[in-house]
Image: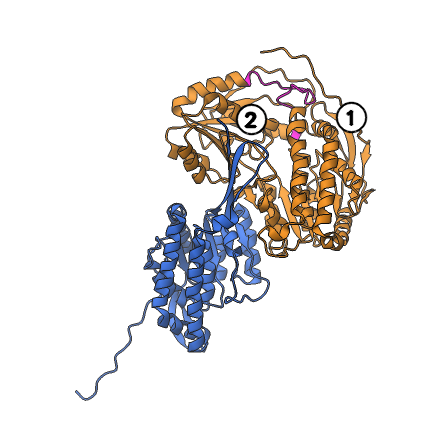
């Protein structure tokens, strides 16, 4: 034996995340993902209309259980996601470096911010109702209480920039209140999204609460926007043309639409509660008071 | 059944002009086009007045007036804006009887309802939002929440003045100015409201009223000077508006149709439930988006409940809306009457059994007797489509889970009713019903302090309460 052969790394196959499982696209399609420098990183699945529909089915199936879980339980699970993410800090930092070409230090900060964002939202699960609900002093002998309830299945077009922090910042506010979602990951940088799916899959998050599709946003998002069993759509990551198409399609069943922000988003800034309130309904219950 | 002597409310209290222009920038102005339409009393088909049909140029004029008034109105201290709204509330109270009679004449609803429900709620709504005008910093939308600008508001004919109040009061309290289009068949109370704005010395342009039909509403919604669109009406039109606003920065709230389930569990007090079911579907001739148009009754008590319900329907008095003893007034228009007839015929054709009490129908005007259908399947059109008339579809269920599943089996989600003496069952059902308002052991209650609005295809946004402010603030 003259020379020790260098060990060949075992690469990961990046697939979709639907209903808690990792299927390939039913279409059998994939596309090459490159680093910010243009180097080949991996082939990601290119999701189809059928994949989008399967993901909506999975999200719908998960809705009753997830929205019916206690707020405390949902908060615990979001915190668990933060714990799992923290444990893979190095892996995510490396993926963010590949995707965005930022320094290792900056990438670490972005992963830290993503972990902290999850912790922040985890704490909201059992507080948002107190902030957005109200006991209403009506002019009559009635108990009258308004409380926020999740909208249902929400489609999320994740921002193209901020493949981890941006992604976590759009998913967490949707699910912490009890919605389930189908996310279209950043087309340019989808790999951190699938690695995040591995975190979600090991955080006691019920299958189907978050479903992640990779591929072309322009191809997949309109299917979701026009899907009659989707109740809301977050267009944060849609370009202006795609956003108009999706908003028009969303009108068919009067989806709640979160339009893309007017300017560039600073994902490190205080997120506020608007991303949660965008996908909450107010339910008001009346009951007479008397003997 | 008791005999009642006629007890009509005097219509002398109202002074209807033969013809109305548009209310723009605090003045009555003539429209640019020639088109005018007659508004009729649906109970007699008598012409009440002619109103202008605003075209694009008129809408543009109104939006410009509102835009011009916006800086001063939004810049005014909230406490001063509040005082204008309090003034308006007081004038509405002072002129309540007149407005109630006018509403009944133009809409066909019983005077008992316009006098005891609509008008008190209209005044209360202005009172409620007046108080918010100088307290917006405490409403949970940031320290200095800003208004949006010009609100384009389009309202329906079922509660003409109440819907105007729901739209205008929060908009003005938050510092917006408005252009409002009332429904084509019920413009008169909105035009009377224009006079009230003048009596209150409201600055010109803060409230503008443009009358017309769908094209006028479409021109208003599409106007580039409008920053906020608020619409109450059919889901079909709501969908169209939502689509047309894609790609704009206009904020939209929609309060649309419904097909509410009124669920009666076997332990419910039957007499109370019957009253609630009657109020749920026959209030305002069933011209109510949140009407309890699907009765879901537990099989074990269905026969008893239906018997009591039919007995009660036999005592409802249909006729002259101005008569203080009238329970069911006129259908608002010939068009709506045709729609109710068409769906009722579809109910029979699809195999449901139709029943109405014996009920004399006046010779003139638009009328439909209180009607219920039994043997209704979920697939029937009368169980799926909004009839917007005095027609109740009765379905049965065996278990609470089945009741909730059937109640939620609709694209709508505006309201629902639950009748049971068991608190835990009531809260269980309320938490599972996908509807914006759940009335338990009551139905069709409204209050300015209580948010109202739908889930799913019943629209989005809330009217009433602190929640109602969000629609008119840049948040």
Q: Chain of mark 2?
A: B
User: For residue A214, what is the image quadrant?
Assistant: bottom left
Q: Would you say residue A209 is visible in this rendering?
A: no
Locate the N terminus of chain A by quadrant.
Answer: bottom left
First-in-chain label (2 vs 1) = 1
- Indicate the secondary structure of the residue bearing disc 2: helix
Residue on which disc 1 sits: B13
Q: Which chain is orange?
A: B
Q: Chain of mark 1?
A: B
- On screen, residue B377 versus residue B208, left or right, reads left
Q: Position of residue B170 (x, y in %)?
A: 65, 45
Q: Would you say residue B208 is visible in this rendering?
A: yes
Residue count near mark 2 (Cα–Cα under 10 Å), binned few <14, some 14–19, many ≥20 = some
In the image, what residue occupies the spot 51% across and 16% down? B311
Residue on which disc 2 sits: B279
**Colour of chain A in the rendered structure image:** blue
Give B454 or B380, whichever is nearer the viewer: B454
Q: Position of residue B102 (x, y in %)?
A: 73, 29
- Indicate the secondary structure of the residue bearing disc 1: loop
User: For residue A40, what is the image quadrant?
Assistant: bottom left
Magenta region, mostly helix, strand or loop? loop
Whether residue B322 is in magenta: the answer is: yes
- On screen, residue B216 versus residue A12, left or right, reads right
Tell me where the magenta segment starts and ends, as one range: B313-335
């Amino acid at each position: 034996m003259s020379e020790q052969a260098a060990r060949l790394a075992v690469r990961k196959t990046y697939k979709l995340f639907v209903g808690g499982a990792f299927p390939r696209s039913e279409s059998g399609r994939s596309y090459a993902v490159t680093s910010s420098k243009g180097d080949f990183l991996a082939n990601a699945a290119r999701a189809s209309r059928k994949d989008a529909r399967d993901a909506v089915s999975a999200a719908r199936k998960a809705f009753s259980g997830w929205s019916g879980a206690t707020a405390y339980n949902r908060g615990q699970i979001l915190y668990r996601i933060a714990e799992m993410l923290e444990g893979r800090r190095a892996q995510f930092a490396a993926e963010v470096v590949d995707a965005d070409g930022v320094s290792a230090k900056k990438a670490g900060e972005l992963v830290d911010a993503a972990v902290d964002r999850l912790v922040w939202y985890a704490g909201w699960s059992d507080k948002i109702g107190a902030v957005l609900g109200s006991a209403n002093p009506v002019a009559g002998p009635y108990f009258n209480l308004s409380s926020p309830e999740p909208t249902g299945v929400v489609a999320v077009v994740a921002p193209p920039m901020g493949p981890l922090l941006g992604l976590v910042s759009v998913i967490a506010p949707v699910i912490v209140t009890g919605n389930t979602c189908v996310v279209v990951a950043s087309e340019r940088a989808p790999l951190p999204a699938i690695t995040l799916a591995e975190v979600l899959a090991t955080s006691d998050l019920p299958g189907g609460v978050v479903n992640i599709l990779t591929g072309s946003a322009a191809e997949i998002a309109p299917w979701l926007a026009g899907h009659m069993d989707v109740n809301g759509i977050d267009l944060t990551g849609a370009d202006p043309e795609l956003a108009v198409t999706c908003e028009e399609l969303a009108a068919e069943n009067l989806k709640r639409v979160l339009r893309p922000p007017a300017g560039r988003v600073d994902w490190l800034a205080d997120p506020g509660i608007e991303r949660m309130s965008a996908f909450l309904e107010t339910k008001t219950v009346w009951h007479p008071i008397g003997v | 059944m008791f005999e009642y002597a006629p007890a009509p409310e005097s219509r002398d209290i109202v002074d209807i002009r033969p013809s109305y222009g548009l209310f723009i920038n605090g003045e009555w102005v003539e429209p640019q086009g020639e088109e005018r339409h007659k508004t009729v009393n649906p109970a007699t088909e008598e012409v009440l007045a002619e109103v202008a049909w605003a075209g694009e140029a008129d809408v543009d004029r109104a939006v410009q007036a509102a835009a011009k008034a916006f800086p001063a109105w939004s810049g005014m201290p909230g406490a001063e804006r509040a005082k204008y709204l309090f003034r308006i509330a007081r004038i509405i109270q002072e002129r309540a009887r007149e407005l109630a009679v006018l509403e009944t004449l133009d809409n066909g609803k019983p005077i008992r309802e316009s006098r005891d429900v609509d008008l008190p709620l209209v005044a209360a709504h202005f009172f409620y939002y007046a108080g918010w005008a100088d307290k917006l910093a405490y409403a949970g939308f940031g320290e200095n929440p800003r208004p949006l600008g010009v609100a384009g508001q389009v309202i329906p004919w079922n509660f003409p003045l109440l819907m105007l109040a729901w739209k205008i009061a929060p908009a003005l309290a938050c510092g917006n100015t408005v252009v409002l289009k009332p429904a084509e068949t019920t413009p008169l109370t909105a035009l009377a409201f224009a006079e009230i704005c003048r009596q209150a010395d409201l600055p010109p342009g803060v409230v503008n009223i443009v009358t017309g039909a769908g094209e006028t509403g479409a021109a208003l919604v599409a106007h580039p000077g409008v920053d906020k669109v608020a619409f109450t009406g059919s889901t079909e039109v709501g969908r169209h508006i939502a689509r047309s606003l894609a790609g704009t920065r206009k904020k939209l709230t929609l309060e649309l149709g419904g097909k509410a389930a009124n669920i009666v569990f076997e332990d419910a007090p039957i007499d109370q439930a019957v009253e609630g079911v009657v109020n749920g579907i026959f209030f305002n001739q069933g011209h109510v988006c949140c009407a309890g148009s699907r009765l879901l009754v537990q099989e074990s008590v269905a026969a008893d409940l239906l018997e009591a319900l039919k007995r009660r329907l036999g005592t409802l008095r249909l006729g002259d809306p101005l008569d203080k003893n009238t329970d069911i007034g006129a259908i608002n228009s010939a068009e709506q009457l045709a729609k109710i007839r068409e769906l009722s015929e579809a109910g029979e054709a699809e195999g449901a059994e139709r029943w109405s009490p014996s009920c004399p129908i006046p010779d003139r005007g638009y009328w439909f007797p209180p009607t219920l259908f039994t043997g209704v399947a979920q697939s029937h059109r009368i169980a799926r489509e909004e009839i917007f008339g005095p027609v109740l579809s009765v379905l049965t269920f065996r278990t609470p889970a089945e009741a909730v599943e059937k109640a939620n089996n609709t694209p709508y989600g505006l309201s629902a009713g639950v009748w049971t003496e068991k608190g835990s069952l009531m809260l269980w059902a309320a938490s599972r019903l996908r509807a914006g308002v759940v009335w338990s052991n009551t139905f069709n209650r409204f209050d300015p302090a209580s948010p109202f609005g739908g889930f799913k295809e019943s629209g989005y946004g809330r009217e009433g309460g602190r929640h109602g402010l969000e629609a008119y603030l840049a948040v």
